[in-house]
Image: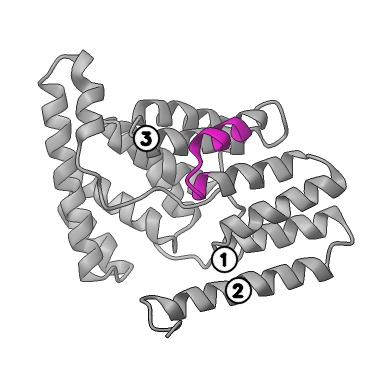
Amino acid sequence: MKDAYPAAAEAQQRQAAEENANTRAGANIDTQATYLKLVDQMQQEGLWFASLAHIDALEQRWGVSPDSTRARAEALRHAGQPLPSEAAYRRLLATPLEAAGYRGLGLLAGARGDYPEAVRMLKQAQVRNPTDALLLNDLGYASLRAGLIDDARLPLMQALQLKPDNPQAQANLAMYLEVTQQREQATALMDANKIPATTRAAIQDAARQLVASTRVSAAVPVANNAVLNDNAVQLTLKASRSTTPAPTGSTSRGTP
């Protein structure tokens, strides 16, 4: 039976979502701005491959723009195409979306385990967009992974105060507190935000791995650090998933 294979229901739901997105796009392409909004909505729904097809159609009709290039870079990164994604992000560096270009390059560097380069790129993005909470969260996380523990505190605190309800910002700051032996504060933060037990265990395990890898890295010559970083166990927590603009209207909650 065609519906008997594993994940058939999920595949059908995704197909229906893509068809619905295609229908919406076909009915609302009277302006470039409208089409870009539809592409952004597809990407927010995780339809990265479908969005690539619509970016092609958009650029055929209206030409290449920084917004379409950003959308293409994002889609390619999430579709597992790092080289063309990097090329697209680099094309943003001389445009008004330069910050998105540097952030994307930083995320690509982090994905291949080059956290010092990720920090360098994300700092360039921060200079150009200093109030982006997701960017600050990425910078703090990359700093932790690069062994720059002290440098991680400021961007992680900023990220949480700018977006108090963001689970990634909560988790990464809790990890920083665990790494720096501030366990009471970490527990208070996780209690205040009702972080589930499984997530708490992941945060604590990630912190232990990070402390161990940082100690080992400090004990060997600098020339070997890149090898250690490449072979380190991947931490459970991840950087922010997208540079697509997030919807506004988050509620305010206390921070430690």
Identify the element where label 1 is drawn: loop
Q: Nearer the viewer, mark 2 or mark 3?
A: 2
Residue 12 coordinates in the image, percent (x, y): 52, 78
Residue occupying the point 79% across, 45% down: 59
Using residue 155 as the reference point, say whether residue 67 is left or right of it: right
First in sequence, mark 2 or 3: give its number: 2
First in sequence, mark 1 or 2: give its number: 2
Q: Residue furthest front?
A: 1
Displayed quadrant of residue 1? bottom left
Residue occupying the point 22% across, 22% down: 225
Displayed quadrant of residue 140? top left
Check disc 3: other Cα within 10 Å, few if <14, some if 14-19, many if 20+: few
**Residue located beneath label 1 in the image:** 45
Q: Amino acid at mark 1?
A: Glu
First in sequence, mark 1 or 3: give its number: 1
**Residue located beneath label 2 in the image:** 17
Is residue 132 in the magenta section? no
Identify the element where label 2 is drawn: helix
Q: Amino acid at mark 2?
A: Ala
Residue closer to the observer: 67 or 27: 27
Residue 237 coordinates in the image, percent (x, y): 31, 52
Using residue 175 as the reference point, say whether residue 110 is left or right of it: right
Residue 190 coordinates in the image, percent (x, y): 27, 63
Identify the element where label 3 is drawn: loop
Which stretch did the figure color magenta? 77-89
Q: Amino acid at mark 3?
A: Arg
Q: Is 12 rendered above or below residue 133? A: below
What label sits on residue 112 in the rendered view?
Answer: 3
Distance of label 1 from label 3 (alpha carbons): 25 Å
Residue closer to the observer: 119 or 229: 229
